[in-house]
Amino acid sequence: MKRILLCRTDAIGDLLLTLPVARSIKEQNPELFVALLVSRYTAPLLSAEPYIDQLVAIPGRGFKDYGLAVAFARDLRKLQLDAIVYFYPRLSLAYAGWQARIPLRIGTGRRAYSIFFNRRINLHRRDSGKHELDLNYELVASTFPELERHEPSLTVTDSELADAQALLQKHGITEGDNWILIHPRSHGSAPNWSLERYRELSVKLIEKGIRVLITGSALEADLIHEEFDSVGESLVNLAGETLLPELKGLVRLAPLLISGSTGPIHVASAVGTDSIGIYPPQSALSQNRWGPRGGKTRIFTPPVETESLKPLQAMDQIRVDDVANYVFDMYTPG
């Protein structure tokens, strides 16, 4: 085998929990050409990873149009691949790999379109009780036995740090200031605290002399502005102001990140920033399945049984005071 493509076209956290496998494969087989297929949205995170020989980005998670899948198969042929691994299988991508006649096509074996794979791995992801990172290693274990395992890590470039520092200075945050980062939205990837709870937490932190910076996407900006703008000048609302490279630099500079089960908490772990995670109790969504790996993270989950509660109601059983007191214990303004 000389050339391999690893496919992970879903969200930030999912991708970051797959990167260690790419690194392990490259370290075990330094002569192997390792390409990574990702969504165009997540690609900017990976510009400086030395174990990725080529980054291939597509507009979304897969192709809805048959013609686009056929066209992508032609692109795959040009890569002259010996193998392709589907960590996040999509019908259109599985078909494209088959149409491109890639000799070894590795994927899970329990989907209707698993016929397009010729090495089918019997993985029960959702109810396995295993972490996503461990499952990703299991997917390639028969092809790459005895890989040395790694935890997620991301390289932060000097330019990313400089852009983040410029953003902080723009909003009056200078070296020596006491501040933390809160990312309150999760794009529906898992039940999360309500914005009202994050707002209550922000007020408590500000009362203790800690400035709060709120991040979010441009699509979330109006909702976040509506909820947080009345908090006061000690809260800095950055929703819609950061692209992924700037966000990566900002998370790296932050003393602490507070977030639900979503991409930025995995970025924090990968760049070495402490974090607090607000996670649901359901096993398929819990920290045991989707929690950040490799960093210092404190996870809060609902303290009561939630069978009789709707997911968002259950999440709001996590007490704001408990999270705030933990912040005060671990982060003391100087």
Image (cartoon, rainbow, N blue to C red):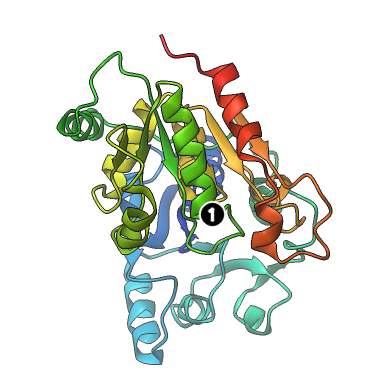
Q: Is residue 279 visible?
A: yes
Q: Position of residue 76 (x, y in %)?
A: 37, 71
Q: Nearer the viewer, residue 222 or 91?
A: 222
Above or below, comparing residue 76 to residue 298 in the picture: below
Q: Position of residue 53 (x, y in %)?
A: 35, 47
Above or below, comparing residue 83 to residue 240 in the picture: below
277 left or right of 176?
right
Kind of residue sitting beneath label 1: Asp
Above or below, comparing residue 134 to residue 166 in the picture: below
Q: Nearer the viewer, residue 195 or 143?
A: 195
Quarter occupied by residue 68: bottom left
Q: Is residue 3 visible?
A: no
Name the element at disc 1.
helix
Q: Say which residue label 1 marks.
A: 14
Q: Residue at x 22, y 28 (%)?
A: 165
Q: Residue at x 78, y 44 (%)?
A: 303
